[in-house]
Image (spheres, helix red, strand yellow):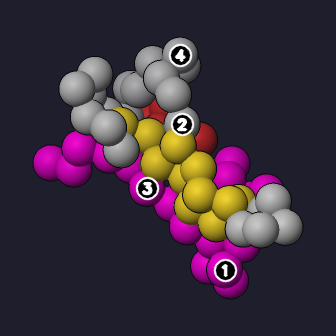
């Protein structure tokens, strides 16, 4: 079982639809809403990747 849920943009930067699909997947996995989200962003501030740990001890 994965320790994190990770999503990246199909075309380098994430779209709003890709981000929404990530949030839906994380919620279906039962991750609490107060869990921190890690994001890698480009120099222009666009989201390239987001990661959420499934367990409390996971760093993502």
Report the disc number at residue 6: 3
At a point 36% along the width and 44% down the height, the residue shown is 60
Q: Which of marks 3 and 2 is nearer the N terminus?
A: 3
Q: Earlier in the sequence, mark 4 or mark 3?
A: 3
Q: Earlier in the sequence, mark 1 or mark 2?
A: 1
Label 1 close to label 4 by CB (< 8 Å) = no
Cα gap from disc 3 to disc 1, whole angstroms: 14 Å
Cα gap from disc 1 to disc 4, whole angstroms: 27 Å
What residue occupies the far bottom of the structure in this picture? 11
Cα gap from disc 4 to disc 3, whole angstroms: 17 Å
Q: Disc 4 marks which residue?
A: 34
Q: Which of 58 and 33 is in front in this view?
A: 58
Q: Disc 1 marks which residue?
A: 12
Q: Is residue 25 visible?
A: no
Q: Disc 2 marks which residue?
A: 37
Q: Is residue 38 visible?
A: yes
């Amino acid at each position: 079982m994965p320790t994190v849920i990770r999503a990246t943009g199909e075309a380098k930067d994430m779209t709003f639809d890709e981000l929404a699909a990530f949030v839906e997947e994380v919620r279906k996995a039962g991750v609490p809403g107060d869990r921190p989200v890690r994001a890698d962003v480009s120099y222009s501030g666009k989201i390239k990747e987001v990661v959420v740990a499934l367990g409390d001890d996971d760093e993502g």
